[in-house]
Amino acid sequence: MIDAHIHLDQYEETLLSSLLQNLAEQDIEALIAVSMNLASSLRTQGIAARYPGLVRPAYGFHPEQPLPPEEDLAALLDWITLHAPDMTAIGEIGLPYYSRTEAIERGEAWDMEPYIRLLDRLLGLAARLAKPVVLHAVYEDAWTVCDLLEQHHITRAHFHWFKGPGVTVDRMISRGYYISFTPDILYEQEIQDLARRYPPELVMAETDGPWPFEGPFTGRTTHPSMVHDVAAAWGALHGYTGSEAKAILTANTVRFYGL
C-alpha cells in the first residue's frame, strides 16, 4: 500500500531509519512525505534522496503556524519552483482552523485574510507548476478552499484527514477532489459516516504520522503500516474484502499522484 500523507521530517532520526528500512516487510511501497516550511522541505528532500522511489516528497507551508515574513515566503516559493521536477506535490498547505479556534476560545482576535492570501499564492504556484496540492482544510475552511481551487482551475486536490458539513462534502465530490482517512476511522463515528458517503474512487489511506492515535493504537508510535488497518476498516464499511480495499485505495493514490 501507499501512505498518502506522512510527516517523515518530524520523526527522530534513529526511529526514521528503522521505519524506512523495514517498509518492504510491512507491504508498504511508497510514502507521500509532506512538509511544513522551507527547513522542513529541505529535510524531506534529504530523506527522499536517501530513499528514492519509496519517499515521494511534497513541499509547502503548513497553515497551523505563524505567518512567514515576506522574504521567507519568497525564498520558499523560489525553492519549490527550482525543485519542482523532483517534487510529487505541493503540500501541506491550507487554512489554520485549529489555531484560529484556539485563539478565539482564548478571546484573542484573529485575521484570516493573510492566511487566505498566503494559500492563494501557493495555489497559484501549484497551478503554474501543474502539481497536485495536499490540503489542510476542515469544517468551514474547506468551502473557502474550494472557492480558491476553482479560481485557480485546480482539479487535483487532496483534502487530508477531512471533516466537514454535508454541503461541502457534496461540492468536493462534484469536483472530483480526493480525501484520505487515518487510523481514527477505526473508532470515530464522524469519520466512519464520511467514509460511507464519499465515493470509493476518490479515497486514499494515510497516517499523518507521527501524529498519535487512540483506540487500538493507544501508546503506539504511528507507523505507515497502519494504512493496512485503515484499508480494512474502510473496506468493511463498503463490503470489500481486505485485499479489495487495499487494491482500490492504492490504485487511487497511484492515479492521483501520478506514481
Image (cartoon, rainbow, N blue to C red):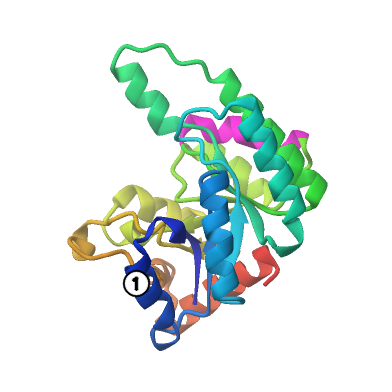
Residue stretch rendered in magenta on the structure:
139-151
Which quarter of the picture shows residue 181? bottom left
Depth check: 152 or 62 in front?
62
For label 1, the residue is 229
Residue 143 sits inside the magenta stretch: yes
Up the image or down, 212 lies above or below 37; here it is: below
Taking the image as shown, residue 214 lies to the left or right of residue 28, namely left
Label 1 sits on what residue type?
Answer: Asp
Residue 154 in view of the camera: no
Q: Position of residue 219 (x, y in %)?
A: 17, 62
Residue occupying the point 22% across, 56% down: 214
Query: Label 1's element?
Result: helix
151 on left or right of 34: right
Residue 81 vs residue 163: left or right?
right
Q: In percent of the image, x 52 and y 67: which residue is there? A: 47
The residue at the point 43 percent across, 76 percent down is 20
Res. 18 image quadrant: bottom left
Outermost residue to the left? 219
Q: How many marks?
A: 1
Q: Residues within 10 Å of mark 1 (few under 14, many from 20)?
A: some
Q: Position of residue 50 (x, y in %)?
A: 55, 74
The answer to whether residue 11 of the structure is visible from this angle is: yes
> Does the magenta segment cover residue 110?
no
Report x, y in % for residue 204: 52, 64
Residue at the extreme bottom? 25
The C terminus appears in which quarter of the rendering? Answer: bottom right
Residue nearest the observer in this picture, 220 or 57:
57
Residue positioned most to the right: 128
Q: Main secondary structure of the magenta part?
A: helix
Residue 183: x %, y % from top left: 34, 62
